[in-house]
Image (tube, rainbow, N blue to C red):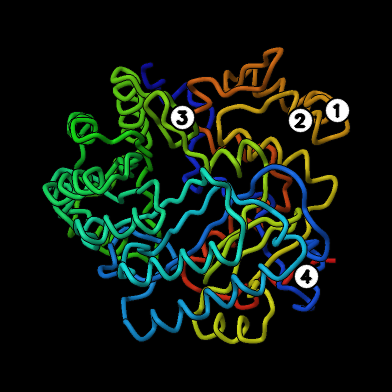
Amino acid sequence: MTAPTISTLPYDRRDRQPVMCYPMPWAPPQDRTAVASLMGLGVPAPGQPKAMYVHIPFCKYLCGFCPFVKYSHDEGRVEQYLADLKREMTTYARTPYLSSVEFGSLYLGGGTASILTAAQLDDLLGHARSAFRFAPDAEITLECSPITVDPAKLRAARAAGVTRVSFGVQTFDDGIGQASDVAQDGATSRQVIEWAQAAGIDSVSIDLIYNLPGQSAEQLTKDIDTALSVGVGQVTLFPLSVMPHTKLARDVESGKVDAIGDLRHELDLCTAAGDHLKQRGLTQTSVPDYSLPGVDYRHARIHFADYQDLLGLGAGAMGTVGEYTYVNVAELKRYHELVTEGVPPVNAGQKTPEHEKPRSTMAMGLRMLSVSREAFADRHDGARPEDVFGPLLASLEERGLIELTDEDIRLTDLGALFGYDVAKEFYSPEIRERGQRLAERLARKRDVVDVGLGHRSE
């Protein structure tokens, strides 16, 4: 696949904000005691396995490009946070809904989830397993910064039940990494991947960022070759997004580092990386993910392809339970206060209105490249996608962004390049406006009532 020329591009910009859930939550809860009712936690929940996300918002090193909810590591603060996190778990686990479900995946993210000591990790996972019911083959992912693991910690993680690790490598190139403020060098990234495999963790995924300052296609494909040579089974590609409140944004503005490549350069890099991954035997399994044959990423599949609940736990975590989409408060003191009260520590959230549910099916499913017609009909009383989105689907097909088959609605190669833009074509105008504004502010640990998004849910 060759990157199309700018004159033929379907959009004059490229949305870099991933589809995480739909709708994006924005409304502060009017009554926190009613949140559990809105989630439907008072009744048992039969059905397929659910997913769980646990946010650990602490970092040993605050990378200059990172826009996510994070705090500098402080052991006293970590201990308090873990106590609060277990309290939040226990509160949810006591409800009829969440005590009856089976979880097929648990993803420990961050921040830096691997900042936890071996004992803390074992205790947290042990508490989760005692509080909730997990499938015997549940996928347990530990998101890792290469500078926070060693062989002993990885062996302990495997003993605690971790089956998959995801390393924030970003690049193996030392020159590009230094300019971009990546925490570790390439040798360290290669070493930790080998340590993980030696510890018995067979499923190893890495993140690579493209369009880093000064990065060429040759450097990016070399990063891919390095990853595959040391046994990585899945590669997640992220375009660099320079958020205005980050150190990298200030460095670019001051001229300390090279300016970020334009849209054409970004697309050239993405296309080169995607083509190279496919030539090396990987298949694109979602907008950002490429996997070797037989490598499954169950957590993403449960939430985005099977449309099952994602229980988000921890400060700043996002989740969807019982068609109630929410994001937790990000500020640690407020998080502590709310979990101590025994109420869901929700910053913003709302029940998905009926008219928004087909939009959710399309937006979430297209992150995974396609939406099954059978799944759409099952979720929406036998309706076909054309019955709800006929003109939009025809327009997207005419623009070469989707393919309509008898089995599904599928992104084309061009559509996958602009995957989040295409998925967000199905957002309602209200959700698009409010969700984008909220996404830009959440990383700054602001409560929704502080950012002019004070619309309240019905």
User: Which three-letter amino acid code belongs to the residue tagged 1?
Assistant: Ala
* Element carrying mark 2: helix
Amino acid type for the residue under numbered disc 2: Phe
Q: What is the spatial separation of the Cα atoms under label 3 and label 2, in whole angstroms?
A: 24 Å
Tell me which numbered mark, 3 or 2, is placed earlier along the sequence.
2
Q: Which mark is residue 456?
A: 4
Above or below, comparing residue 180 to residue 302 in the picture: below
Mark 4–mark 3 Cα distance, whole angstroms, equals: 35 Å
Contact between marks 1 and 4 (CB within 8 A): the answer is no
Q: Amino acid at mark 3?
A: Leu
The residue to which callout 1 is attached is 383
For the residues bearing labels 1 and 2, Cβ distance under 8 angstroms: yes
For the N terminus, the image quarter is top left
Q: In terms of sequence position, does the residue under pointer 4 or pointer 2 come before the other?
A: 2
Task: State the separation of the CA atoms marked 1 and 2.
Answer: 7 Å
Q: Which residue lies under the disc numbered 3?
A: 417
Q: Secondary structure at mark 4?
A: loop
